Structures are given as C-alpha cells and as structure tokens.
C-alpha cells in the first residue's frame, strides 16, 4: 500500500466506510483476482444482494471477504475492525481493551477484549523466518497478576510467584534486530532446547550466559559467556534491554500480565518491537496476517494458553 495512511485523518479518508474496507480485504485475500477457496476456480462475481460476498462461477460456492479470517462471524462493522487494528498497530505503547472500548464506543468490555484478543492472534505470521546469525538467548521472570494485585516473587531463577519467559534477540552490527519471546514451564534443558529449536535457525551462533541447560541445544553453535562477577546486562546487553522494555510495557499498558494469556501478550510485544521502525505499516501486516488465519471463537480465546 504505497499511500499508507500516516495520520488519523489520512486513515479516515482511506477507509471511510464498509465498502472501502471490504475492497482492501478482497485485494489482500486475492491479490491476483478472486479464487474460490473450495474448487480453486478463478472466475466469480460479487453478489449485489449479499454485501462483500463472491460467488464462484465453477461450483457456485459463496465466499465473504471475511470468511476464514479472524473477522469471520463477527457482528462488528468492518470499519470497527480496521480502526481497532490501526490503533493497536500504531499506538506507541499499545492499547488496552478498556481504552479501545472508550475510543471506539463499543457496547461492552467483553466485545473490546474479544476484538483485542483476536487481533493479537493475528500478530504472529505462521510462516515467519527463524532468527539467524548471532543471537543472544536468555531467560527472565515476570510477576503475574491475580485479581488486581501483583504477587510477591522469589529471587534469581526461582519461579515462585512469577511467570517464566525465554527470549532471543538477533544481533547485527552491535544492534538488535528481530526478537522472539515464549512462555516456558521451567528453565530446564528440555524447555530451553525446545525454544531454541522453534525460534532459531540451524547454524546460528547462540550467545548465552553459560546456564548449563543450553548445552547441546539442537542445530546451533553454543557460545556461553559465564557471568561470574560481571553484570548480566554486560554479557547479554540486548536481551536484557528487551526484557526491561517488556516489563515496563506490561506494567505501563496492562498494569501487569496474567498467566492465563501470557503468550498472546508476549506475541504483541514481539510484533511491536519487530516493527518499531515501520509502525504505520504494521497495520497492513496485522490485517494481512489476519486474512490467513482460521476463525476464533470466544470459548477458544478464553482457554488457558499452552506454556512451552
């Protein structure tokens, strides 16, 4: 989108109504023209009596521009989805469900929360490339909320009262590149090796603080730097900066995170960090990924997420 809107006024001019939003979704889903998701026929027409729905000339199947996306089955207007995606993608620190409720005038907190939750699930591209080159890998802990209060936590690598997180940061020219974060059940070799395998490309040099559990991590050249008397942020400066930013963000925007949906919030932080220099284009990524994902129900979203 060469003329990507860079202000609220430009955004409103670009997407003033349902028709403009539907046209953008149709182009995002079918950049080379309509193709039936059933029989793959490339001929069809838009139905005059069914808004934003196409009928296949081959099999007669009718397909909405939102079918099979995170927006499928929603009773919200497309303009609401687009505004929510734009605010979530471009707001400097993110936006909570309560803020979205107020800014978009939604009917209930549940509606705002569901909208945010579905968009967070669209922040991770299924086919994203793993980190490569030199990658700092480390772990941290973050206190979790129960009700309205933060739980007191133990020290060091203790998991008492805390959620455990593994992180990896690409480093090039002494600058941070892309980031990955994941909730893990413990700091064992089993958990950390699984994190490395899922997020780091084979042949990568993995720079760690010498924690023994990293030894033998699959497909990487392990470069341990035992901390000893050195401060950890000296040995692994970028991973510690990312962890520090994560904790400030979690407290500043959400007043702390809850264990139940930790991974979704980590995914949001990663999405923002990896697009920190192209924040406005992040809107296109957010809705673009959303057109490739399966629909999600409220029951699916409120289930506790897997750890590790």
Image (cartoon, grey):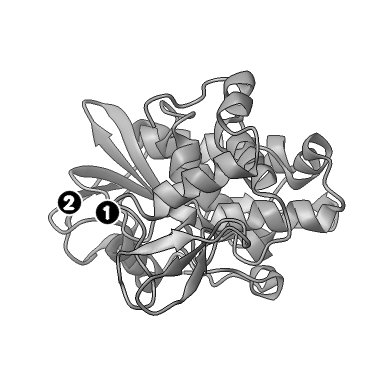
Query: In this rendering, is residue 186 above or below 46?
Result: below
The residue sitting at 31% across, 59% down in the picture is: 127
The residue sitting at 16% across, 63% down in the picture is: 219
> How many discs appear?
2
| Left or right: 204 in relation to 12 | left
* Badge number at residue 204: 2
Label 1 residue SS? loop
Q: Position of residue 165 (x, y in %)?
A: 50, 56
Query: Could you say which quadrant of the image residue 66 lies in?
Result: bottom right
C-alpha distance separating marks 2 and 1: 10 Å
Query: In this rendering, is residue 158 above or below 123?
Result: below
| Left or right: 54 in relation to 52 | left
Residue bearing mark 1: 130
Foreground residue among 197 and 276: 276
Residue 166 appears in view: no
Say which quadrant the N terminus sits in.
top left
Chain-order first, disc 2 or disc 1: 1
| Left or right: 280 in relation to 12 | left
* Outermost residue, front side: 48
Residue 63 appears in view: yes
Q: Position of residue 198 (x, y in %)?
A: 32, 64
Q: Residues within 10 Å of mark 1 (few under 14, many from 20)?
A: some
Foreground residue among 140 and 170: 170
The residue sitting at 58% across, 27% down in the picture is: 11
Q: Position of residue 57 (x, y in %)?
A: 38, 71
Label 2 residue SS? loop
* Badge number at residue 140: none
Foreground residue among 187 and 285: 285
**Residue contact between numbered discs 2 and 1, judged by CB atoms under 8 Å:** yes
Q: Position of residue 40 (x, y in %)?
A: 31, 72
């Amino acid at each position: 989108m060469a003329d990507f809107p860079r202000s609220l006024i430009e955004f409103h001019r670009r997407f003033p109504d349902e028709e403009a939003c539907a046209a953008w979704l149709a182009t995002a889903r079918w950049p080379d023209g309509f193709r039936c998701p059933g029989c793959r026929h490339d001929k069809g027409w838009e139905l005059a009596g069914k808004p934003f729905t196409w009928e296949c000339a081959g099999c007669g199947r009718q397909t909405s521009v939102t079918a099979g996306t995170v927006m499928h089955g929603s009773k919200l207007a497309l303009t609401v989805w687009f505004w929510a995606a734009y605010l979530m993608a471009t707001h400097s620190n993110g936006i909570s469900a309560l803020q979205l409720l107020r800014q978009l005038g939604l009917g209930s907190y549940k509606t705002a929360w569901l909208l945010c939750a579905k968009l967070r699930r669209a922040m991770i591209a299924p086919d994203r490339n793993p980190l490569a080159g030199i990658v700092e890998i480390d772990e941290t802990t973050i206190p979790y909320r129960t009700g309205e209060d933060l739980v007191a936590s133990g020290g060091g690598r203790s998991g008492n009262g805390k959620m455990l997180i593994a992180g990896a940061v690409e480093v090039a020219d002494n600058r941070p590149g892309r980031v990955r974060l994941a909730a893990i059940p413990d700091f064992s070799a089993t958990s950390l090796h699984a994190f490395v395998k899922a997020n780091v490309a084979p042949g990568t040099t993995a720079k760690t603080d010498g924690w023994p559990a990293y030894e033998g991590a699959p497909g990487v050249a392990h470069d341990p730097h035992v901390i000893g008397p050195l401060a950890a942020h000296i040995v692994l400066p970028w991973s510690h900066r990312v962890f520090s930013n994560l904790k400030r963000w979690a407290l500043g925007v959400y007043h702390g995170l809850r264990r139940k949906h930790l991974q979704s919030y980590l995914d949001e932080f990663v999405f923002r960090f990896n697009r920190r220099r192209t924040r406005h284009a992040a809107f296109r990524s957010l809705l673009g990924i959303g057109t490739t994902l399966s629909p999600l129900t409220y029951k699916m979203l409120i289930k506790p997420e897997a750890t590790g």
